[in-house]
Amino acid sequence: MLPLLPPHDPFEKPLDLRLTASTGKLRLAVILFIVAGLYIISAKLGLSLALTAKQVTLAWPPTGIALAALLLSGYRVLPAIFLGAFLANVTAAEPVLTALGIGVGNTLEALFGAWALQRFVGFRNDLNRQRDVLGLILFSAVLSTMIGATLGVTSLCLGGVQKWALFLPLWRDWWLGDAAGALIVAPLLLVWLNRPCPRLRPGMLLEGPLLLGALAAAYAGIFMGLREAHSEWKFIIFPFTIWAALRFGQCGTTLVTFIASALAIWALTGGAGSFGSALLGENLLVLQIFMMIVAATGLFLGAIIAERGETEKKLQATHQYLKNMLDNIPDPIFMKDKQHRWIDGNKSFWDLMHGPPEKFLGKSDYEFFPKEEADVFWEKDNKVFDSGEVDVNEESFTDFRGERHILSTKKVAFRNEEGEPFLVGVIRDITDLKKTEAQLLKYTKELERSNQELEDFAHIASHDLKEPLRGLNIQSGFLMEDFKDKLGPEGLRRLTRLTQLSQRMERLVNDLLHFSGLGRTEMAVQEVDPNILVRDVQQMMETFLSEHKARIVMPQPLPKIVCDKTKITEVFRNLITNAVKYNDKPKPLVEVGFLDAVETPQGQEHGVFYVRDNGIGIENRHHQEIFRIFRRIATPDGERETGTGMGLSFVKKIVERHGGRIWVESAPGKGTTFYFILHPKGGVHE
């Protein structure tokens, strides 16, 4: 057997047919010997049927042998093809130069046929694609054979072997003989030598000999004279070709076509058969044309069947892939027809239904669920069928164990190949999610109630604390006024300290009341121009700013916002106060601005306000601490008791009530920048 080339992918570059260095010299010699020998033997058989001229025949198997050899073994067999063609002709008493010309023509013919098939078709030797069959007919049987016929007849005429007046009939016979070899012999060799044919089933081992026996019997009757008066009986070859293509693929098709052609030629040369009503040459011409049509028809039929089989395999593989994929989707998926009967589902769906598919397929909801639930399913399914729109809703059903499930279901209608509508539903069991939501809602309400109680307690406690603190402050004043001379310096110092502590305690209580009120009062939301708001804050703090030689700047106008004006004023006032207060520069600078976008560790934020200073900065470990209630950091002079430590707590709570958030970027000695956003309840006004 000739060495085989690896299967070729038509979408890759054309197969490289060059000689490979790895091929052993002995093996190559054997291949060349076999190709040349087969070429010479088949050439002698073909020339025995030469009728128009002894050098020209209508049956030329070497064309098929040469083409198959090139496609199976590559360019390395070109010397064997040339040698076989030259020897076959030179031993037929033809001049050497004429034989050389014919040899060159036959070699170029095979070379062009093989190259064109690989270059333009991406040819596969199994002939299981229609493009391969079409390419074989066009490039090998039609075009490449013109090269051999043209060079061959020209060589005969130039060598004086034949007259130029016979050029056209000789060219016709030469071309048809080569074309028959390309269509009948080459496919047989390509298919049978390219790879083993499909393994036959036991029944086909009997069917194969039956097919060949019936073919031989039919041809014995047709071509041996039993039906000489009815030449149309020759068309009986087609049922056998179809039989072979359907049952045995291209292996059977090529074998039946070759055997039928051989039997027909053998019978015809004996003067028998349904082609025997005219001269032998004319009969052979008609026979070869007819058999080429049979061969082309059979090859196309075999390719169509092979492509259909391959398509069916791919469809089955795709179907299995989709089924496996659906079965591995955790969400249940089901399908129903227009009569609301289940027609398919994935593994998760059958698990949800607690039963095998056979239990449900072809049946409707009414056979498994309470009527009330089935009515709901039926109504919603009809809505999807009628509207054609996607429907997403929550449904509930009771399974066969009595457990109630809440489902989030998405349904959509499709149409199958016959145009019949069917419904696909995707289910997500949200029973546990609903339970969790209910529990979270319960916890949320309890937390809201607890927070409200805490706020109420803080409000009441603060009010109750104010009265004794006020009394303590008044009594301290009376003591200082009435017993100033008797207390002495140490007593006055302690009494003064007592008064300061009671006043500080009162401020703390007032701030606590204010903090509690921030969560209780309604938001007076309106459109606000923050540029005016900042100027108002600057005027209110004019004395404070002047004392500290501080300055407020705005690089660009701020956009209008929707917010609670009073509360946002307090935000800017607190942030500006801290920026001046915690500043060690001779001239503190406070910058108030707006940024369209800011990158943060949590992602990009849009519509961001900021207040930036050139003060002492804040250590990273304090960045979250400063927003907590009663948390303070030291001022530049080391004083820690300035203020109550509630300012940034007020700011954070106000910003969060506007649906936003606040964060800080700072480092010791590099100033501080507070960023905040106000959305969705408050935000940038477009």
Image (spheres, rainbow, N blue to C red):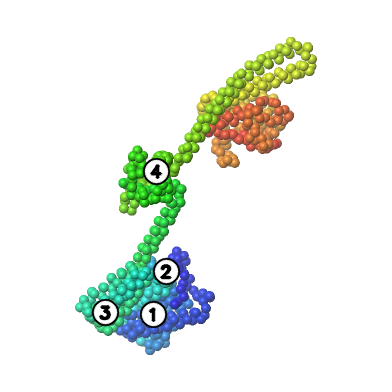
**Residue denoted by label 1:** 62
Q: What residue lies at 25% left-to-right and 81% top-to-bottom?
A: 224
Q: Of the residues shown, which amino acid type is indicated by label 2?
A: Arg
Q: Of the residues shown, which amino acid type is indicated by label 3?
A: Ala
Residue found farthest to the left: 229
Disc 3 versus disc 4: distance between alpha carbons? Answer: 72 Å
Disc 4 versus disc 1: distance between alpha carbons? Answer: 76 Å
Q: Of the residues shown, which amino acid type is indicated by label 4?
A: Phe
- Asked if labels 2 and 1 touch by Cβ distance under 8 angstroms, the answer is no
Disc 3 versus disc 2: distance between alpha carbons? Answer: 35 Å
Left or right placement of residue 563 versus residue 48 in this view: right
Discs 1/2, front: 2
Across and down, in percent, residue 293 comes to: 30, 72
Q: What residue lies at 74% left-to-right and 17% top-to-bottom?
A: 495
Under circle 4, the secondary element is: loop
Under circle 2, the secondary element is: loop
Q: Decide which of tag 4 and tag 1 comes sooner along the chain.
A: 1
